[in-house]
Image (cartoon, rainbow, N blue to C red):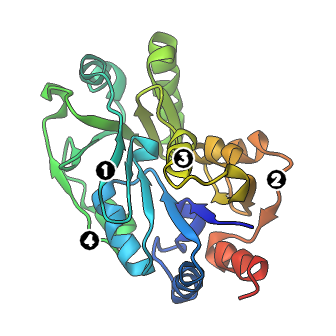
Amino acid sequence: MHTMIVTDLDGTLLDSEHKVDPYTAETFQALAAQGINITIATGRHFLDVKGIRSVLGVPAHLITSNGARVHAPNDEEIYAENIDPALARTLMQPEFSAGSLLNAYVDEGWLVERDCPELVGVYYKDSGFGYQVCDLKNHSGEGMAKILYIGEHAQLTEIEAKILAQYRDQVYITFSAHDCLEVMAPTVSKGHALQAVLSRLDSDKTHCIAFGDGQNDIEMLGVAGTAFVMANASEKLKAAHPNLPMIGSNENHGVATQLRSMFKL
């Protein structure tokens, strides 16, 4: 019997406008009423995802910053892992960040090297989350859950290659979207964080259902006993899990439709 559902947000649970639609919210509320544990696993910041969880209308564990933070439904922090401060300072220098918009996540919020209001308008309609402009290249590097580079994919792949060439064993690096490259501590991933949540709930991974669409979902889908790939998933995710079943796209309520079928809602 399935006792846990874990889902990514953007490109998976959220619609094409990065919002929770009523059909999805009603589905998850019905499942929570049956005693199913819900976990949201995303690259987004904890303070952002709290707002999305409120719109979804269910108690849920939150795996955020790609697994660098895990919070219980009551917002108690149960896991945290930061990038080594010295390495964080290095990765925020122009040698690595040139050609991208440099961002970082700390517990207090989202830091961006320059004003970029279009970012807020696209992704944060439900939560109202916003950034603070910060001189990141002179930041101490302390307390950083992740560093983000936003830009053209070709430029980001060059940044990725440069980081891996010098620091492969000191980072976990992944694309959360085509235009967003993210760097965390080497022990961080949604998969590691999901294992921590399952252990906390004394739940077996075979009873867990997972949904994802991006490269940063690869490890998570590998942990869950039952996993589904979105129709709109990235080619890297499809290549990593070629045998997993594919469901409808996020635009067509793929997650909610699959769950309604499985749980006879």
Q: Position of residue 244 (x, y in %)?
A: 82, 53
Residue behind mark 2: 244
Q: Is residue 178 visible?
A: no
Q: Which mark is residue 69?
A: none
Q: Nearer the viewer, mark 2 or mark 3?
A: 3
To which quarter of the image does residue 219 belong? Answer: top right
In the rendered view, tell whether residue 20 sits above or below residue 26: above
Q: Which residue is depicted at the point 26% across and 71% down?
A: 128
Q: CA distance from mark 2 to mark 1?
A: 32 Å
Disc 3 versus disc 4: nearer the observer: 3
Residue holding disc 3: 199
Q: Amino acid at mark 4?
A: Gly
User: Relative to 264, does residue 250 appear above or below in the rendering?
Assistant: above
Where residue 198 sits in the image (x, y, percent)? 56, 51
Q: Is residue 238 above or below residue 144?
A: below
Callout in the foreground (2, 1): 1
| Label 3 – label 4 distance at C-alpha | 32 Å
Lateral position of residue 10 relative to residue 54, left or right: right
Provide the residue designation for mark 1: 77
Q: CA distance from mark 2 to mark 4?
A: 35 Å
Taking 107 as reference, is 17 left or right?
right
Which residue is drawn at the image coordinates 35% and 37% (left, top)?
146
Badge 3 or badge 4: first in the primary sequence:
4
Q: Secondary structure at mark 2?
A: loop
Instruction: Provide the secondary structure element on which disc 1 rests.
Output: strand
Q: Which mark is residue 128?
A: 4
